[in-house]
């Protein structure tokens, strides 16, 4: 597996996270829930499929390179949390503090992984 692919994949995960956060902010503002089949399901399915591939690649890289303070369990937790919040983002009654906590947690893990990959790349 190429390091460039993992960097690009991790950046794409960050993009999904940003998009999920933007959806949540918009839904909170408008208080309108999106249509399940035309909007929510395609977005969620795309994230579920992509996050599975990314997590497998990232976990393999972590197992091979053994970076400090990052473990496959963290990557799996980030994947699962993103899968949860990508659904919750479409509902205005979702807890703000819990949602934002998950966003920050996922972002931290993704940033930490990118930092470790770039260290090893040098």
Image (cartoon, rainbow, N blue to C red):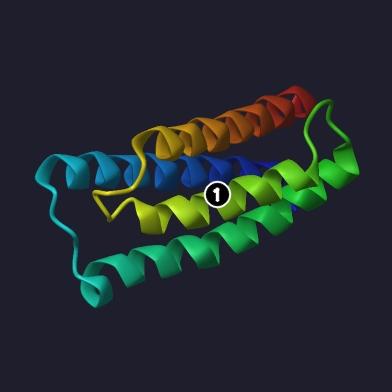
Q: Is residue 27 left or right of residue 122?
A: left
Query: Whole-percent x and y of residue 30?
Result: 10, 45
Q: Nearer the viewer, residue 8 or 30?
A: 30
Q: Nearer the viewer, residue 58 or 86?
A: 86
Which image quadrant for residue 64? top right
Q: Is residue 35 left or right of residue 64?
A: left
Name the residue: 66% across, 48% down: 77
Query: Whole-percent x and y of residue 68?
Result: 84, 26
Q: Is residue 66 above or below residue 57?
A: above
> Which residue, given by chain and number where applicable, does mark 1 sit on?
81
Name the residue: 62% across, 55% down: 54
Name the residue: 46% across, 60% down: 47
Task: Point out the image quarter for the C terminus.
Answer: top right
Q: Is residue 48 above or below residue 117?
A: below
Which image quadrant for residue 95? top left
Query: Whole-percent x and y of residue 82?
Result: 50, 50
Task: Specify few, some or many for label 1: CA neighbours under 10 Å numbering under 14, 14-19, or 20 or more.
Answer: some
Query: Whole-percent x and y of residue 20?
Result: 35, 47
Report helix, strand or loop for mark 1. Answer: helix
Q: How many marks?
A: 1
Name the residue: 35% across, 63% down: 43
Which image quadrant for residue 51? bottom right
Q: Work out which residue is located at the far bottom of the displayed protein and give it.
A: 37
Q: Is residue 91 left or right of residue 105?
A: left
């Amino acid at each position: 597996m190429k390091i460039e692919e993992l960097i690009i994949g991790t950046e794409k995960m960050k993009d999904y996270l940003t998009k999920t956060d933007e959806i949540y902010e918009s839904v909170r503002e408008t208080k309108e829930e999106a249509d399940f089949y035309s909007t929510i399901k395609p977005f969620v399915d795309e994230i579920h499929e992509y996050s599975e591939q990314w997590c497998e690649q990232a976990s393999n890289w972590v197992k091979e390179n053994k970076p400090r303070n990052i473990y496959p369990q963290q990557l799996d937790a980030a994947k699962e949390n993103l899968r949860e919040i990508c659904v919750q983002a479409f509902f205005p009654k979702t807890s703000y503090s819990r949602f934002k906590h998950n966003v920050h947690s996922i972002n931290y893990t993704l940033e930490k992984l990118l930092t470790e990959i770039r260290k090893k790349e040098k």
